[in-house]
Amino acid sequence: MKLRSVLILLLPLTLGAQNGERVFDYGFEQRVRNENWNNIFDWNDTLDDQRVQVRYRTRLWFKGPLSPDVDFHVGLNQETCQIVTPGTPFKFDEVIFETAYLDFKKLFVKGLSLRAGRQNLVKGEGFLFLEGTPYDGSRTIYSNAAVLTYAFRKSKIEAIGVFNPRADRFLPRIHNKSRQLIEWDDRAVGLYYTGNYNQRTAVETYWFFKKESGDRRASTHPQYQPGLHVHTAGARLIRQLDGRWSLTGELARQWGARDDGKTIAGLGGYGYLKRAFGGRKQHAASFGYYGMPGDDPATGGRIEGWNPLFSRWPKWSEMLIYSQFREVGAAYWTNTGMWFAEAVVSPWKPVSARFTYYRMHASHPFPGDPRSFGTGVRRGDMPQVRVDIRVNPSWSGHVLYEHMAPGSFYSRRSHAYFLRFEAIYAWQGKISAHR
């Protein structure tokens, strides 16, 4: 009742000067994750890097109309990690604004809309655009952005601008920890087109120009990155072959230059075939390949490594992103190719189980510390199992297990594992008011 009373007091700010009903939406989510892992940084069982931790993330959000055509959205977020092994004192982390944007649903041209402010940007299946804050883990994925959208028939074109600084300096924090969100400042502009031509075919095409600058590490640091600008152009196709077979593919090319004079020439993409089973198509099997080639050390004046732009998140593995700390950076997907096979089964509606196997390789050996990296290109084999359950609209959770058998890309070959249990309680409501 206290939360409801506070929101009722905020309602006059959203009523504007117009008469009629105003609906105020609000929600709360509490997520608890228990994570247990070992060897995932270096694949070396002789070093003790076992970790057991519990992550508590709390979110509170509300949305209200400023007018019939303009909404505002604000969300708060706080995540604290309690490390049990090795024993670490519990410390309450900062409270931040996860979202804070204005949604102009109608502008001066029919079909034109604008969303401006801190928001979550997800495009396609996240191969190019999903994560704006990779260094805060799964706490947030937001970007500081403006998205101007023109929708027509079954298509839309989005003009997108993004500015994500190394550390948040746009909105206040409570109990500020000055958290680093990325290694450098990210700026980007681009266009994203989505077209649903018929029930069987959907096409997405895009172009983005991104600038990375302000790496504060010493230029002698092995992971220091000079400033760069990179163009990325590509397309994604989803084709329904018949009632149960579908084909999905995405391919993108990159070009540009770094401040040290090296040119950029990257290429990345994926493709997979999927077959649905069951009366409700609740089961599925997929097979395909993901490729994010790496830089060839033999071409000193050119960078062929794939730049993941805004997709530094654990799309393929929660485990593997930690070992990437010793390459370019956490969740920096490059120099990686993977064949995969996956099966999804839902024995009954509230439960879904996913079984995935990845066979991973690199384009080139990594010229890093020989105590961690070998001379081969086989990254290894990774089976995964994930079981999701949704008890009701408020309660959900999952169990995830990943196992890694490292290959010749690494100098150490100890097997590693990642185990996670998650529970989420979510609740939302509405308040209607009349002026």
Image: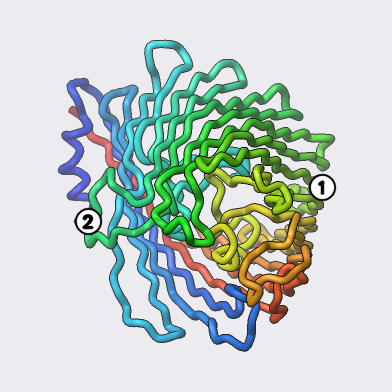
- Viewer-proximal residue, 328 or 133? 328
| Secondary element type, mark 2 | loop
Disc sitting over residue 1 in the figure: 2
The outermost residue toward the top is 109
Q: CA distance from mark 2 to mark 1?
A: 48 Å
Residue 305 in the image, given as x and y percentages of width and height: 66, 48
Residue at left offset 74%, top offset 28%: 201
Foreground residue among 279 and 46 = 46
Residue 106, by quadrant, is top left
Q: Is residue 198 above or below residue 319?
A: above
Horizontal side of residue 426 vs 19, given as left or right: right
Q: Is residue 252 placed above or below 409 in the rendered structure? A: above
Residue beneath label 1, please?
275
| Image side of residue 253 versus residue 161, left or right | right
The residue under the point 57% across, 57% down is 328
Give x and y (percent) for residue 29: 39, 57
- Under mark 1, the amino acid is Arg
